[in-house]
Image (tube, rainbow, N blue to C red):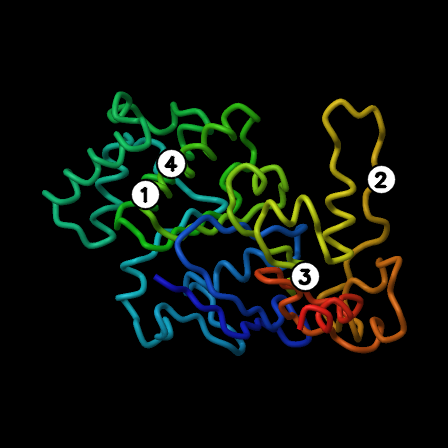
Amino acid sequence: MELQLQHLCKHYGTKHAVNDVSTTLTPGVYGLLGANGAGKTTLMRMICGVLKPTSGNVCLNGKSIDELGEDYYAHLGYMPQDFGFYPDFTAREFMCYMAAVKGLDKKEATTRTKELLKLVNLHEVADKKIKSFSGGMKQRVVIAMALACNPKLLLADEPTTALDVVVQKGILMMLMRLQKQLKNTMIIVSHDMGVHYQITDRMAIMYSGSVAELGKTEDIFNDPIHPYTKMLVDALPRVGEDVQRVGIAGRPPALKNPPPGCRFAPRCPHATDRCRSEVPKFREIRPGRFAACHLLEEEVKTNG
């Protein structure tokens, strides 16, 4: 399976929420990282077809999702950031209901519910009401719901928000296990770099509606190449280090009427006049490493 994002843009009048995002995804775990307002959720909603792009396309195996229609949604599982439950339903009742919504008949829904609740280790509490569940247990119900149609593409928007560290790790380990078992494509949206470090194979760093850097997660943490990514990694605390690290000074620009040039330029200590006036192209800097930064052009020429 191959998911292609082709020059995706989403504008609300003069507000540029997502601007020219392109990449190709194959089976594996992908991370989408950025601060609040970076465009992560907007991009995710375009991928799952909830939001129509202003321009650009989302394609599955070479066909646009508009062309595929229901065939695309049959392959899609979505874990929204905020999901409303029917609190008086038991886990079994809720899952049977959601399976029916996805088009399964009563017998199929019953069978699939039993399989999924066992898969997420909730089979022993299947007949307890959801309102009695902890945050971690509710999140496992959401995972089960997203897996109802055995998706080739699973989208998880902030799957560990508001969970304590121990429960968070359990959810992440479960998602990793499920991806290896199902061999699907999983996209994890999170503003938490620790989440990406633990679970993702590749990750994209978003800043103010655009992708600043994309590559293998290990490479990005060990050798970031975009100034924004470098400053994010430098701000992370180190184990055993008694030093208070400083965050990035300043604020991201307003998405409405953004400044010309690179959107990170006002906060970048290395910015040049060109950075402030000309939008950098998102390009391959090294094999498998992509970034949008004028300062990396010499490396592109050397490697080219």
Q: Label 3 belongs to which residue?
A: 212
Q: Which mark identifies residue 246? A: 2
Q: CA distance from mark 2 to mark 1?
A: 40 Å
Mark found first going from the N terminus, 3 or 2: 3
Circles 4 and 3, Cβ within 8 Å, touching? The answer is: no
> Which quadrant holds residue 38?
bottom right
Classify mark 2: helix, strand or loop: loop
> Which quadrant holds residue 273?
bottom right
Q: Which mark identifies residue 177? A: 4
Q: Which mark identifies residue 145? A: 1
Within-10-Å neighbours for mark 4: few <14, some 14–19, many 20+? few
Mark found first going from the N terminus, 3 or 1: 1
Mark found first going from the N terminus, 2 or 1: 1
x 68%, y 68%: residue? 303
Mark found first going from the N terminus, 4 or 3: 4
Expressed as whole percent of the image width and height from the top left, the position of residue 198 reads 55, 36
Q: Which mark identifies residue 73? A: none
Q: CA distance from mark 4 to mark 3?
A: 29 Å
Classify mark 3: helix, strand or loop: strand
x 78%, y 42%: residue? 234
Query: Which callout, 1 or 4, points to the residue nearer the camera?
Result: 4
> Which quadrant holds residue 288?
bottom right
